[in-house]
């Protein structure tokens, strides 16, 4: 139907207020199919819930998955208006142009990772953002959020202005796959094929606002020497930057190769096939902790990053591996990570205990328990 977006918005706003809600119906969405929402979406039917994925993204609509519905359709309009709840990882804007305006509609935000850096209202620059007021209005509609430990629940409660008892300690559904990993199909997507190897290292730096990441940030970086060292270690190094980061790896080497979304859409799916991680401040580090495998840190702009956006916890308190600042130190750290993975095990256990109350594959089930339960009273709107 060729309505303009304002007509879709108006119609969904009116119907959302007028129509009764279906107590079993939940709509799901996200900026991609995956993350914390897809496992819950796929498990909802077994709990007697009706799940629909609303999207306008062509790649998701073309996937052929059951329950995927176009937001710009009569069916999408009707389902959005009738939904008992909406489950998301970012914002209600992901369902645009449809609106889910009724206060009778539960808004359950699974978020998209346990953050290391300060986000949303905790970011010192938040109130200068053009979207700040809109974000605050949306936060006031959150019935609840989901975290991995009491420490992480406190951070979410402060950031999203929720009572801490409305942050459920479920874990993250997307990490359940770490305990039942899919086969490493991503390896077959490389052409030409990767060189023979028995060990893999993932390099996954965080995104920086206004500046590209500096990969291998050493004055004495030697790409040829790194290739030779990886060959000696029988390893490949897979580089994955944020999709919006202009600093991504531009050229493939022999054993240093990019691994973006075209190769591995979900980074969590490939973590079990990695023997070590390189990062700076990416929350993928917290996910990797569940596997109890070594991490090498390259926090080359630590002082600047600590100012803005800043860290929730002092960076030194969450470190569990070396922080080399020379190329020689870096290759030594890679050797240690692969040949002596038991090193820094005590530090990993300490941070893991802070971040996770449960290290298991039942996060999805615990989230579904919340969806199947009566709504949590939200009280007065929060500003």
Image (cartoon, rainbow, N blue to C red):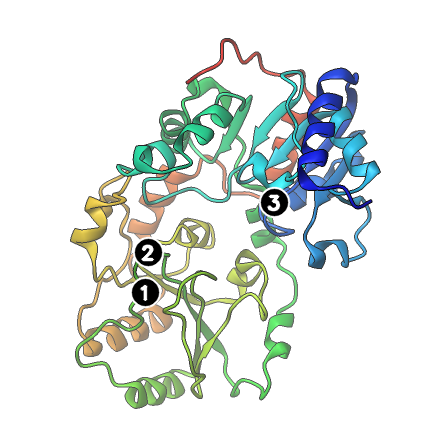
Q: Quadrant of residue 206?
A: bottom left
Q: Position of residue 286 (x, y in %)?
A: 41, 49
Q: Position of residue 178 (x, y in %)?
A: 56, 54
Residue 131, placed above or below residue 332: above
Residue 253, placed above or below residue 324: below
Report the side of 312 relative to 17 (left or right).
left
Q: Position of residue 73 (x, y in %)?
A: 80, 41
Distance (Cα) linking label 3 and label 1: 25 Å
Q: Which residue is mark 1?
A: 213
Q: Earlier in the sequence, mark 3 or mark 1?
A: 3
Q: Earlier in the sequence, mark 2 or mark 3?
A: 3
Q: Which residue is mark 2?
A: 208
Label 1 neighbourhood size at 10 Å, few (<14), some (14-19), many (20+)? many
Q: Which residue is mark 3?
A: 30
Q: Quadrant of residue 182?
A: bottom right
Distance (Cα) linking label 2 and label 3: 22 Å
Residue visible at 46% across and 36% down in the picture: 148
Q: CB atoms at circles 2 and 1 under 8 Å apart?
A: yes
């Amino acid at each position: 139907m060729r309505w303009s977006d304002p007509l879709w918005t108006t119609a969904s706003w009116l119907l959302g207020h007028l129509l009764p809600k279906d107590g079993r119906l939940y709509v799901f969405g996200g900026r991609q199919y995956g993350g914390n929402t897809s496992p819950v979406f796929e498990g909802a039917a077994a709990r007697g819930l009706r799940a629909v994925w609303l999207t306008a993204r062509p790649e998701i609509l073309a996937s052929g998955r059951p329950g995927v519905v176009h937001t710009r359709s009569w069916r999408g309009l009707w389902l959005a208006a009738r939904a008992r709840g909406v489950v998301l990882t970012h914002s209600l804007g992901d369902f645009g142009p449809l609106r889910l305006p009724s206060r009778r509609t539960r808004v359950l935000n699974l978020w998209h990772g346990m953050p290391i850096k300060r986000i949303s209202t905790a970011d010192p620059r938040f109130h200068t953002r053009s979207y700040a007021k809109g974000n605050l209005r949306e936060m006031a509609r959150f019935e609840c959020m989901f975290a991995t430990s009491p420490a992480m629940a406190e951070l979410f409660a402060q950031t999203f202005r929720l009572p801490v008892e409305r942050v459920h300690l479920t874990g993250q559904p997307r990490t359940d796959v770490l305990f039942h990993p899919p086969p490493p199909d991503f390896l077959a997507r490389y052409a030409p094929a990767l060189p023979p190897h028995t060990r893999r290292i993932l390099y996954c730096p965080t995104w920086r606002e206004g500046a590209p990441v500096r990969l291998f940030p050493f004055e004495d970086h030697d790409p040829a020497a790194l290739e030779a060292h990886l060959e000696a270690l029988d390893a490949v190094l897979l580089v994955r930057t944020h999709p919006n980061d202009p600093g991504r790896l531009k050229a493939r080497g022999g054993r240093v190769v990019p691994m973006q979304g075209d190769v591995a859409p979900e980074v969590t799916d490939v973590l079990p096939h990695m023997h070590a991680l390189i990062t700076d401040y990416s929350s993928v580090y917290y996910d990797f902790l569940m596997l109890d495998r070594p991490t090498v840190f390259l926090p080359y702009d630590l002082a600047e990053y600590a100012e803005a956006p800043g860290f929730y916890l002092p960076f030194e308190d969450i470190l569990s591996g070396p922080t080399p600042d020379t190329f020689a130190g870096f290759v030594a750290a890679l050797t240690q990570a692969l040949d002596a993975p038991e090193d820094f095990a005590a530090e990993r256990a300490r941070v893991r205990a802070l971040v996770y109350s449960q290290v298991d594959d039942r996060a999805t089930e615990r989230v579904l328990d919340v969806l199947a339960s009566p709504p949590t009273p939200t009280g007065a709107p929060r500003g």
